[in-house]
Image (cartoon, grey):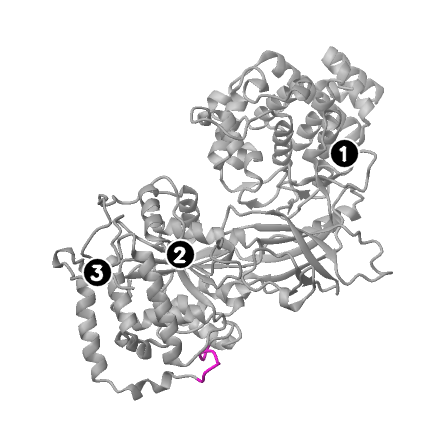
Amino acid sequence: MAFYPAQLEAPAVPMLTQRPRVLEDMEVELNYHAKEIPLDAFVRAFLGVASDMWAAPLQQLLEDSFVERELRDYCFLAHTSNAPEVAATLLNDIKKHAARLLRVTYPLEDIHFISQDPPAVREQLLKSGTIARTADVDAIRNLDRGGTYGSEDVLLPIQIEMTDARVYEDLSTGAVDDGLFSPLYEKFMMVSRSTVLFLSVCSRSCFTQYMYTRNTGPAGFGDPLSSMSDAERKKIVVYETTYTVAPPAFKDTSPMAQLIAKQARDVLAYSRGSRQHAFGMVLRGEHMQLWYFNPIGIVHTPQEFSILDNFGTFASIIVAFCSLTERQWGNLEIIQTYITASKSPASIPRFPHPSLTGALIKFDDGRVYCVEDRIHSEPAMIVGRRTFVYNTVLWNRQETADDHVPERLVIKLSYVPCWSETEWSFIQDANRAGIEHMPEGFSWGEFFRVSERGQGCVPLLQKDAVWSDRAFRVAVFPEYEPILGGITPKDYIRVIRELATSAYGLYRLYKIGILHRDVSENNIMVDPRHADQPWVVLNDFDLAIRTEPDGIAPLTTFAGTRHLLSYEASLQMPMRHRLRHDLEALFTLALWWAADVPYTFTEEESTTPLAWWVLAKGEHEVRAFKEALYAGAHRVADTVPLAADYKPFAPHLDLLVALFREANRTLLPPSTAAVRNAPFEALLVQVQRLAAGIRRIDGPYLSDSDTRILCQQCLKNPRRGIADAAQSHRGGECGQIKLMETVDDDVLTFTFLATLLARDTT
């Protein structure tokens, strides 16, 4: 295809202004995690070769009339809506003619580059101030299902910086209008003339050292781990660290960086766990930038590499991408194979996979599980915890040994911090302590750490950079059901009370030194094998943590599900997690269950505290919602509308608001913490005193009926109620209890319990 810039496709469109920020969430993630490293370090680590591996022989491609013409067209149209089309043609020509020149075949021979049509690019350019563009060029494999493809099919997304939305017609003949020459085009003409002169004095024999036997991959193209020894890898790391490391402070958070990060996030999200990492490329005129995304970080190269000044190296990098194996593209390596319903090898899906459905995974205990339909995945983040949950079945079931393993199972695959304890260790400790309603595990294991997979050596090149390594852990559990669909007003108080203080609640876990840290609607499950009443299971201990001798967790980053965070966690500061934070998350979950809220809001409604909570776009919005809730001097329903069936529980929720306002007194803004509502504050004092009295008399095992009686007595006559309790248990200290300025976790727990029992709802 040849483009001659003689005529516009009418009408002309004004030049575009500098692109505004289009993806604020991507900018935040880039600001936290992106790091710049040298180009050669990037290519060695992720593509397995030196960046100039075939630069000398591939410089000859400029003699090829097709490649030279497409490079010329790209240089002229690099900032227009035609840029993706000519870029894709150029990349396909480089791939094709480089294979002929180097005498190689590619591991994935059917890779090709496909672009957006110029009119579609033009439309997206004009709207890109308000919406995110799709990738301008994608590297994909030939599709069996026709011309349509999704993010899960993309191997390499490419974004091109374009500032001119005009579209040029494809003319078979025509003269170049000198008045329309761009500086990049003029540079191409100069580089092209000098390259022809250089090639004319070079013998082709000087390139024979770069030739390879047909039907073999280029030398050095193995797994980055297996292709070099540990000593060699350490030598490279030391060299790069000492001599070529980029300034660690620089990170690219530009609009183009946001766009390519969004494409990578989509690739990882829509592959639904079947890929470990993703690549990206950005073209800004003559300058190329490479990107790599995985659960422990985002790495990019500088923006200064010129594809004109270094065309041979540019072509070498394209060949390196085309020569990647499935594993190097990010295929999840723990998969033994894929099967289908027909079990025919001919029907086995090829890489890249849209999901893990059909995968066989083998554990160290010898059990093999076949992954079925997807249940849950988390597509919002690139770096950090990723969790994927699928239905699964035991594939190699043994009649005797596996009788206790149910037919309906789920498999959970997570990237979690390496320093975190495995969730099955918490579950086993809870079982040994006699805590019921814990998840039942059948197989589990840690399969690898991200830093052990070759690419992990790159963060070592960053001086003074803190990287959180991630472990890939997999576990198999029974198929539980989320409680939200089965909870009723009849069960509401009982379930919350049991989750807080019963034989399997948060308080009992706290007493054996475990804090859950992620109380959410997705982690409160019901075991369907118990049909008589909801058999609640406290699920997902990926974020759980041990307490120190003082009953508080070590200083860590905040954790939890965003819209259910405690107020202190919403401050986004390192914190020592306490039981009160889990209880506040449980209270927020109870409010979520009882709420009657829309999931879409008008522009005017989006500025209300309710919208901040429901949409939960950031921790700062959750914090603002909590401050508005705790500042309310009257009823919870003034801030959060309750469903009709849950309105009888409004007094309980009102009291819990007062309780957690008191617990967060020193953290809340003065205008919020100073709010006092006499009836609720008086009731709070009474219940706190009662809870402290219960703790001193009988510890955590006072029966619900006794607690209800004591609570009712206290509400009628606080002093008489506590005195009667003290006399009946031969203790007189209860009458001396005063309101505590700093709420003790034990007192808060029993206040929570007493709140739920303060009014008989049966």
Residue 42 position (above or below residue 522): below
> What is the secondary structure assignment of the residue under circle 3?
loop
Task: Identify the residue under disc 1.
Answer: 502
The type of residue carrying mark 1 is Ser
Residue 4 got which mark?
3
Q: Does the magenta portion include 399?
A: no
Q: How many residues crowd mark 1 within 10 Å: few (<14), some (14–19), many (20+)?
A: many
Measured from the top left, where is residue 321 in percent x and y? Answer: 43, 68
Mark 2–mark 1 distance (CA, rounded to whole Å): 47 Å
Span highlighted in magenta in the image: 213-220
Measured from the top left, where is residue 405 in percent x and y? Answer: 80, 54
Residue at 26%, 51% (x, y): give it. 167
Residue 699 position (above or below residue 162): above
Q: Earlier in the sequence, mark 2 or mark 1?
A: 2
**Along the line of sight, which residue is nearer the eye, 575 or 689?**
575
Of marks 2 and 3, the one in the foreground: 3
